[in-house]
Image (cartoon, grey):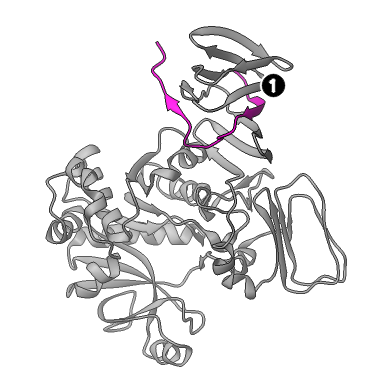
């Protein structure tokens, strides 16, 4: 099975755990059997492998998310990076070109395209396999997975099938309606459009060539910034006459707000938190190393991270985005391919960061023009290379780098550093990569 996972968005409706770099699919909030936590991305990727161990999975994403994806899924995962955001259809077209031109997959093969962030169980992935096989038959150019609606939602578009049964040709699409219209659609047997479909790769590429001028993957990547922003539904699905829908009645939750996130959580408290017996329907998600106490609250979510603190009625939390857009805050936490960092303190002329590197990982060999750096090793062992000079390091060692000094660190075990940056113009843009000879 060939799968394109669409991983995009900034996830501001799950602030303060999400931000412009750390989207909602990277938040580790779902408890596994061994007691550790995994993200939506890790959960979906694991579930795919459990159903089809040989599935070829390609993650279509923005360049800003590549490091986080490698951090959570490993270096071997296949990624189709977008140079910039151009909506779902260009992202799918670029990923399809990546599958054929870079990965060498036959254009006659089928592919399943789906979002990376639904909360689903094994039966969903079994349905994706069935969707993949149905597309192979060639009875229709597109085969959608339609979700059996559980209530008259205003959040989804609706698919009205021509007839009852597991698989049907599509009669018509309906835009996101009001509640009363949604009731009418459901009475006609309509299904939610979850943005999940299968088709042959050559069909996706054909539609891409009709709307965009490009020769191959490299050419499309180079001119990607110039292509028109357009969704797959508008560009293709709503114009396609030969389209089928397959019904799915299993669990499927589109987790995009704290309200829906807490519905999928198995625990009421993640991190340091306590609730009095007077609380009802309250969830605490705390990434800080300080306790949170809730008393006498009802249907409230409390979330704390280095980015900020949210205390909100669950229903009202769905409308937070305009307020979060007004927050001008430096990114305080990010996952990188080599590990992660968390900002501990910011003052005029200095910034203090806690850096964690995975065993066997290393930073790029780089320098900074406008700041000095001091690393204090607090855990683990590894090596530093500073202006070509290599040195073993362990807990308690201090390494000083002046502005312009080329440096990197290699972790032999998990390595934790306190990094102090000193300078009048501290910026994430102040970084020049070098070749390590």
- Residues shaded magenta: 412-437
Q: Is residue 84 visible?
A: yes
- Residue 19, x across and y down, in percent: 55, 53
Residue lying furthest front in this view?
424
- Residue 142, x across and y down, in percent: 23, 66
* Viewer-closest of 343 and 108: 343
Q: How many marks?
A: 1
Residue 413 within the segment the image draws in magenta: yes
> What residue do we see at 13% from left, 49% from top?
214
Q: Is residue 301 above or below residue 24?
A: below
Q: Is residue 107 left or right of residue 321?
A: left
> What residue do we see at 32% from left, 46% from top?
83
Q: Is residue 254 left or right of residue 27?
A: left
* Residue that label 1 marks: 376
> What residue do we see at 34% from left, 44% from top?
81
- Residue 52, x across and y down, in percent: 40, 47
């Amino acid at each position: 099975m060939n799968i394109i996972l669409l991983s995009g968005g900034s996830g501001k409706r799950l602030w303060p755990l999400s931000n412009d770099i750390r989207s909602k699919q990277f938040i580790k909030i779902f408890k596994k059997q061994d007691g550790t936590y995994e993200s939506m991305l890790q959960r979906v990727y694991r579930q795919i492998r459990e159903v089809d161990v040989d599935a070829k999975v390609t993650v279509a994403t923005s360049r800003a998310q590549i490091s986080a994806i490698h951090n959570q899924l490993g270096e071997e995962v296949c990624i189709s990076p977008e140079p910039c955001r151009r909506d779902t259809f260009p992202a799918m077209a670029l990923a399809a070109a990546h599958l054929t031109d870079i990965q060498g997959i036959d254009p006659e093969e089928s592919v399943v395209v789906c979002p990376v962030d639904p909360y689903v169980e094994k039966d969903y992935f079994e349905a994706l396999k069935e969707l993949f096989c149905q597309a192979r038959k060639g009875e229709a150019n597109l085969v959608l997975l339609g979700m059996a609606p559980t209530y008259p939602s205003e959040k989804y578009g609706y698919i009205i099938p021509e007839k009852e049964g597991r698989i049907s040709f599509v009669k018509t699409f309906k835009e996101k309606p009001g509640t009363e219209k949604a009731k009418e659609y459901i009475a006609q047997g309509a299904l939610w459009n979850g943005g999940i479909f299968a088709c042959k790769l050559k069909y996706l590429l054909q539609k891409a060539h009709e709307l965009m001028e490009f020769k191959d993957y490299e050419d499309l990547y180079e001119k990607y910034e110039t292509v028109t922003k357009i969704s797959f539904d508008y560009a293709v699905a709503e114009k396609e006459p030969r389209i089928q829908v397959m019904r799915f009645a299993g669990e499927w939750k589109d987790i995009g707000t704290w309200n829906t996130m807490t519905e999928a959580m198995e625990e009421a408290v993640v991190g340091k938190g306590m609730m009095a017996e007077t609380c009802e329907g309250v969830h605490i998600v705390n990434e800080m190393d300080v306790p949170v106490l809730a008393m006498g609250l009802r249907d409230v979510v409390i979330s704390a991270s280095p980015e900020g603190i949210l205390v909100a009625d669950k229903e009202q939390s769905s409308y937070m985005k305009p307020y979060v857009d007004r927050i001008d805050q430096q990114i305080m936490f990010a996952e990188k391919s080599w590990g992660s960092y968390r900002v501990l303190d910011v003052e005029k002329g200095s910034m203090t960061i806690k850096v964690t590197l995975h065993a066997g990982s290393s930073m790029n060999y780089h320098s900074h023009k406008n700041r000095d750096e001091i690393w204090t090793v607090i855990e683990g062992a590894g090596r530093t290379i500073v202006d070509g000079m290599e040195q073993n390091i362990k807990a308690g060692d201090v390494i000083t780098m002046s502005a312009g000094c080329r440096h990197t660190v290699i972790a032999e075990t998990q390595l934790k550093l306190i990094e102090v940056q000193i300078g009048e113009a501290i910026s994430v843009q102040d970084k020049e990569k070098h070749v390590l000879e």
